Image (spheres, grey):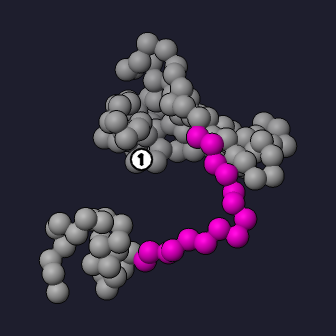
Amino acid sequence: MDGRALPKNVGAAEKGSPDPRFFGYSVGHWESDHTLVVDTTGLDDRTWLDRDGHPHSVQAHVQERFTRTDHNDLELAITVDDPTIYAKPFSLGTVYLKWIPNQIFDEKLCIPSETIEYLKAVGDPAGSTIPAK
């Protein structure tokens, strides 16, 4: 958000080239009062673009556009440009997020002492793999 440029030659053999990272290198800027654009490059090619396992190269450029459409709603549109693997840029889709005032979440802590309870409630609701006490 401070105006810096994205790194160049990520993963190149040249001295001083940055290494790829699982979350890449991201830079954001405001396009308008309601739209934040985040550009990411340098993603480690061992990661996936989505849950279906679509691959990407280190040269992939991912753009996320966060647009607040009104007080309670946010849209996230994701576009990928990776000429090494794909013929043209494409959209991963749009996610619609809604803020629900006074929503109560049942927080689950990820600490060893609560792992069994977490798995019972969330990880394995049928209880088929959790040993009985």
**Secondary structure mostly taken by the magenta-highlighted segment of the chain:** loop
Membership of 103 in magenta stretch: yes
Q: Residue at x 32, y 79 (%)?
A: 117
Q: Amino acid at mark 1?
A: Arg
Task: Locate residue 18: give its quadrant.
Answer: top left
Q: Residue at x 37, y 41 (%)?
A: 51
The segment highlighted magenta reads: 95-109
- Which x, y percent locates residue 127? 22, 69
Q: Position of residue 83 (x, y in %)?
A: 45, 18
Of residues 122 and 10, the one nearer the viewer is 122
Judge whether 55 appears above or below 119 on screen: above
Mark 1 falls on what kind of element? loop
Looking at the image, which residue sits at the far right?
33
Q: Is residue 24 above or below residue 130?
A: above
Query: Is residue 10 visible from the viewing direction of this image?
Result: yes
Is residue 66 part of the magenta span, yes or no? no
